[in-house]
Every structure is written in structure tokens, then in C-alpha cells.
Amino acid sequence: MILRRRFVATGSAAAALKHKSAESGAGRFTEFVLPPLTFFEYLRFTGAEDNLIGVDDDRDDASRFKALDIAGLNDAFITYLNFGGYPEAVFSEAVRRNPRRYIRNDLIDKVLLRDLPSLYGIADVQELNSLFNTVAYNSAEKISLEGLAGSSGVSKPTLTKYLEYLEAAFLIKRIRRVDENAARFRKAMTFKVYLTNSTMRAALFAPLTAEHPAVGHLVETAVFSQWLHNGAYIESLHYARWKKGEVDLVSLDARQKPRFAVEVKWTDRPWDDPREVKGLIEFTRLQKLGRMPLVTTRTARGVKTVDGIEVEFAPTSLHCYTVGRNTLERSQ
């Protein structure tokens, strides 16, 4: 008689689990990554979804959801940015009152100061910690190894290894650059770094309000993180930058052709001023996208023709909800 057993091992030390499974699993382990909560999950967990989200009966596509109360949805979104990535913070007022203690000390510092050093033999723990704080503060920004090396005094080979360790620990995710023709650069010396969870920034520094100058980068981080539940799409994401413009997020298909392009904004200015999205318009004109280019806004929604190009506009909070919900429902 053959007994079949299945063992499940869980843990927050993602790098250690991945390293050990590759080292001794010999193909016997199946890995399941559990990303941070999507905005859709956050609204459902908090019981706010029914009051804030409805279904547009005039549409049957992926964008069929609508905001019943956009001001309330945006308020919930800002709370999600600061506290919504971890279930502990969603359900515990004590964690929300002191995220530095519960999230930074109990989660981030244990990975940075204990797990990664012991796993990879890192001697200068503070050097790694300083690098993570730098990239966390600049989440969604363009970063170069040259600039990091100059500001930190750490060599580029060491920085490259540290970034790989942080990515293995699922603390950050890097995406590569393409040009206006969607062509990759051979040497990826410049890239974007995103926190996998916007809540980490609030725990490391301070929660941000809807009007804070830095909230735009946190908003873009949240838009990016909604795709973490879709392994195929998250690996397809790039950013475009060339001499005359840039686009925040571009998805490439298996043939390296642009599938969609998104410009992330936390303002309604692009709805009235096409100069705000001229990079997206130029990129779309040069490429044959699989779908209409998207500009996320604060409250504006609709389709407009900008310089001969049809562009969809949608509130960032609603877009995050839509991506999270569609992704999870299609995976079931």
C-alpha cells in the first residue's frame, strides 16, 4: 500500500525558501508566491466594496466596474497605500497606529538584518539596509547603478548582488527599459525599482496623505503591484523612455511587441491638457497596441481623442480594483 502525503511549508523568508527548495528539492517542490493584498481584496476584507463599487450595465468588458462614490473610493485607496498591503494592518488598529513597530521591526528588519545576511553571507548589514531604504524611498523612480554607486560608495558589482538579494526576498521588483520602438537596451544599467508592497514605505518613513508631493510614486507602486498576482503579465512589464518622452508601464507580448501602455497620474489635469500625456501619445502612434492606451487619473473617466489617438481615462483607484479583481477571478 502506497501512502501519499503532501507537505506544505510557509514562511515570510521568501529568499530562504526559494534557495533551499532549489538546493535540495530537485524538482520535488512546487512554489506558490502569495503577493500582498490587491486593492480589490482590501475592499472586500474591510466590507467597503459594496458601498464603493458597482457594475456598469452598459459594458461587458474588463472595465465594467464603476465607482459609486469616487471620493470615498479614493479615501479607501490612500488608506490601502499606507496600510492595506498586509492583512495584519487591515485587521489590527494597533498595527495601523504604529506600522514602524509591527511592519518594519517584525517583517522588514528580520528579512534585511537576519534572513538575507545569514543566507548569503553578507558582512555589512547596514550597507544592505541603507540600499533598501534608498530604493524604498524612491519606489517607482528610474535608478541607475552608476548613480547608486556614486551616492552610496558601494561598488556596482556589490550593488547588483544586493538588488538580486532584495528581489529574491520579494521586497522589490525591477523592470527594464525600452525605447519608443519597444526595443530593449542590451545593457540594463538604468531600470525602475518598485516596492512589492506600498505599505513598506509608510512603515519605513511615514504614511502619506492624498496631497503629499511623493504620493504619486506610491500610487504608481500600487498600480504595478496589482499585477503581482499574474506571473505572466508581471514579467512582461517594462517602462519606456527615449529622448522626447516616456511611458510609465508598457507590456510586451511573447514576440516583444507592445500589448498595452499605461501612464499613471494622480491628477485630472491630463483630461484637459494633452501635453500631460504626450509621451504616451507618441508611443501609441509609433506602435500598434493590442488595446487602447490608458491614463489613470484622480476622478476623471471616459474616452477622448487626443491628437488623433483614442485614449481611455480612468481613476487610479478604480483601475487598481479592476486589475486586482479581474486577475484573481480569471485565476480561479
Image: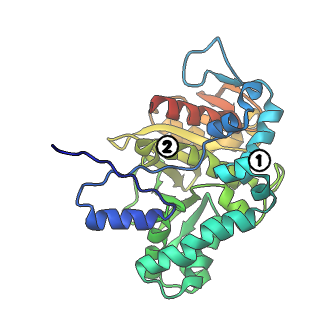
SS for callout 1: helix
Residue appearing at x 79%, y 52% in the figure: 93
The picture places residue 62, in percent across and down from the top left corner, at: 55, 24
Specify whether residue 290 is in view: no
* CB contact under 8 Å: marks 1 and 2: no
Q: Is residue 152 left or right of residue 22?
A: right
Which badge, 1 or 2, is on the more N-terminal residue? 1
Residue appearing at x 65%, y 55% in the figure: 198
Pointer 1: what residue?
79
SS for callout 2: helix
Mark 2: amino acid: His
Q: Quadrant of residue 282?
A: top right
Give the farthest residue toward the left: 1
Q: For this rendering, which residue is in front, 258 or 286?
A: 258
Mark 1: amino acid: Thr
Number of labels in the image equals: 2
- Which quadrant does the N terminus fall into? top left
Q: Quadrant of residue 47?
A: top right
Q: For this rendering, which residue is in front, 25 or 220?
A: 25
Residue 317 to residue 176: above or below: above
The picture places residue 267, in percent across and down from the top left corner, at: 77, 42
How does the figure colour the protein chain or chains? Answer: rainbow
- Which quadrant does the C terminus fall into? top left
Residue appearing at x 60%, y 45% in the figure: 37
How would you rate the neighbour count of disc 1 (Cα within 10 Å): few for under 14, some for 14-19, many for 20 or more? many
Specify whether residue 229 is in view: yes
Residue 281 to residue 204: above or below: above
Q: Is residue 94 left or right of residue 261?
A: right
Pointer 2: what residue?
229
Residue appearing at x 59%, y 38% in the figure: 281
